[in-house]
Image (spheres, grey):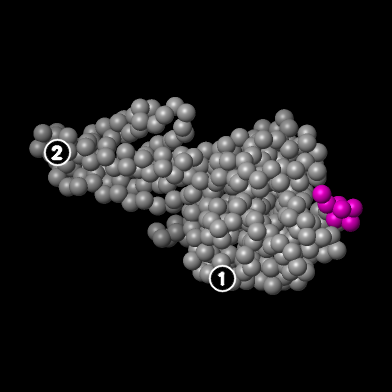
Amino acid sequence: MLDDAMTAALEEMSSWQQDLYEDLHRHPELSMHEERTRGIIAAQLRELGCEVHEIGGGVVGVLENGTGPAVLLRADFDGLPVQEATGLPYASERTQEDADGQAQPMMHACGHDVHTTAGLGAARLLAEHREAWQGTYLALFQPGEEIAAGARSMVEDGLVEKIPRPEVCLGQHVLTSPVAGKVAVAPGPVLSSSVSMAVTVHGAGSHGSMPHLGIDPVVLASAIVTRLQTLVAREISPSDFGVVTVGALHAGTSANIIPDRATMALNLRAYDEQILDRLVAGVQRIVRAECVAARSPREPEFELFHRFPVTDNDEQVAARVREALEDQFGAERVERMTPATASEDFSGIPDAFGVPYCYWGLGGYAEGRETAPNHSPFFAPDQQPTLRTGTEAAASAALAWLRAAR
């Protein structure tokens, strides 16, 4: 629980956090291109007296305060290629030129600006109130979460060797549920593992009036899409979770031309890595079998990308975090987190250190307000009490370990 001095400081920080949040929201940056955001975070951490490390596109502020455990809190800071439609006075109007020279819109459509603002707020509370704790606080800000690249990039750039080893890693995410002012935590799997897959199947081109002289990859791809629906329905136990989604199918250029290939973009999810591997193998088996049935002249091509690990909270750590959150907010503001089918690369960081972790949900919408889901162009969490709740949650959870040494 935050002491009286920290609680009073939360009120004094509200204007600073509002300005910071609105600036970050106005200026989103796409995954692994977050130069401006990284510079703002690093400058803020230096002002707080942190030892600052820029690692793999991310930033870590090391705040040492005597002997004791080290605790790591992670926040992500990349935006999404979404055209904002919230109508907010601080809405993003930024674009970035893509490979084709087209203006790509950018938006904080997943709340990473909330995470960063709350993470810096927690760091400020601890930096300015060192009398309340003892140990080492690691404020980690990660790029590239949306494409499952940021955690890996930081680890590959020597994260484990460059900062003190934490005893535990913590993280949070703003969501549409619970309501603003509440948090939700649970042990076990709370976010799914995920992998995306590009599949190309081959046919033989022909005139649309002469399908018998070609091999139609559109029909082949359609058969594959239909057959893939049996993977979860008929090969995964009803007690297990799995999703197979074909999010895109592209073939051809004209109504009267049978093309020579079709491409599909798939996304697969599960709470168990072995089930996810079974789904991947099942997709490959079905695609190859349908290609044989269609007399495809070439082997299909597969590309796996954007693989996210399962987020599986340690039971003891989750219990300790829940206790800390209930001490801070009261039991009525701490709910049980329902496992979500979204995915995160957060666990790549504690896994690299070989330490347990806990990841919880942060309410972003006031009760009764119409919500828009994460990644929507209308995603707009209420600034307050969301920023304050996120800051309180981050700091009080960290203090569950940092106070223990006093």
* Nearest to viewer (mark 1 / mark 2): 1
Q: Amino acid at mark 2?
A: Arg
In this view, the residue in front, 22 or 100, is: 22
Distance from Cα at disc 1 to Cα at disc 2 = 53 Å
The correct choice, above or below, for 54 with respect to 185 in the image is below
Q: Find residue 170 and name its label.
A: none
Residue 237 point in image, percent of width and height: 41, 29
Quadrant (top left, top right, bottom left, bottom right) of the C terminus: bottom right
Instruction: For label 1, count other residues whose C-alpha is less than 10 Å away and answer few (under 14), some (14-19) or many (20+).
Output: few
Chain part drawn in magenta: 1-7
| Residue indicated by mark 2 | 295
Residue 92 point in image, percent of width and height: 62, 53
What kind of element bears circle 2? loop
Residue shown at the point (23%, 41%) measured from the top left? 288
Residue 5 in the magenta stretch? The answer is: yes
Residue shown at the point (36%, 40%) measured from the top left? 278
Left or right of 284 in this view: 196: right
Residue 73 point in image, percent of width and height: 66, 57
The correct choice, above or below, for 393 with respect to 57 in the image is above
The correct choice, above or below, for 91 with respect to 365 in the image is below
Between discs 1 and 2, the one toward the N terminus: 1
In this view, the residue in front, 249 or 340, is: 340
| Residue indicated by mark 1 | 161
Residue 248 point in image, percent of width and height: 37, 41
